[in-house]
Amino acid sequence: MTNMSEVVEILLVEDNPTDAELAILALEEHHLANKLVWVKDGAQALDFLFATGAYLGRHLDNGPKVVLLDLRLPKVDGLEVLRRLKADERTKRIPIVVLTSSREDKDMIASYDLGVNSYISKPVEFEEFSRVVSQLGLYWLLINHPPLKTNTP
């Protein structure tokens, strides 16, 4: 995982240690986890993304290329994290992928209404989970072309 002064490619927002470990292992397998930060709740995610709290002083320019966001989080739920990120000029263009165990239509609709870039239900089986996370990492880090960063207030 990365030093806070380096560019972050993936922010993993996941409270379940087993799911986080599986995601990190899948990304490491494809050499995509060396610039990864894992936070365990929505409040930590917001602190990281807005450089507040424990992440005060982190450069916002070093924001992630993609956020893998669980919805069921302690402190601040994933939908609220998504709402705040997409409402702020500094973070609204960061691709957000909801990676959640929820298969509820209301969660999917709410996520897309708030501007999520992709919604994926976590596969239950390890092999499938690993494959999905690897493909996510490859797509968002190597294939996708994000907009150029602009100086925003």
Image: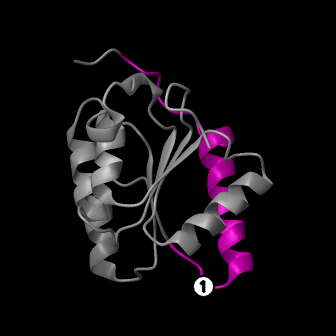
Q: In this image, 152 relative to 97: left or right?
A: left
Question: Looking at the picture, does residue 17 appear above or below residue 53?
Answer: below
Picture coordinates of residue 128, whole percent (x, y): 70, 77
User: Which residue appears at 71% of the width and 61% of the height?
Assistant: 25
* Disc 1 target residue: 124
Question: Looking at the picture, does residue 124 appear above or below residue 5?
Answer: below
Picture coordinates of residue 118, whole percent (x, y): 46, 59
Q: Is 148 covered by the magenta stretch?
A: yes
| Of the pair 62 and 131, the residue shown nearer to us | 62
Is residue 75 something one can see in this rendering?
Answer: yes
Is residue 92 something one can see in this rendering?
Answer: no
Q: In this image, 11 relative to 81: left or right?
A: right
Q: Which residues are magenta?
A: 121-150
Dot 1 falls on a residue whose secondary structure is loop
Question: Looking at the picture, does residue 111 appear above or below residue 146?
Answer: below
User: Which residue appears at 24% of the width and 64% of the height?
Assistant: 75
Picture coordinates of residue 83, whole percent (x, y): 22, 52
Extreme residue toward the top, this view: 151
- Look at the image and tell me in which quarter the N terminus lies: top right
Picture coordinates of residue 144, whole percent (x, y): 60, 40
| Of the pair 136 and 14, the residue shown nearer to us | 14
Q: Main secondary structure of the magenta part?
A: helix
- Residue 20 found in image quarter: bottom right
Question: Looking at the picture, does residue 150 appear above or below residue 116?
Answer: above
Q: In this image, 86 relative to 27: left or right?
A: left
Q: Is 123 covered by the magenta stretch?
A: yes
As shown in the figure, which amino acid type bears the numbered disc 1?
Val
User: Which residue appears at 34% of the width and 24% of the height?
Assistant: 57
User: Which residue appears at 22% of the width and 18% of the height?
Assistant: 153
Circle count: 1
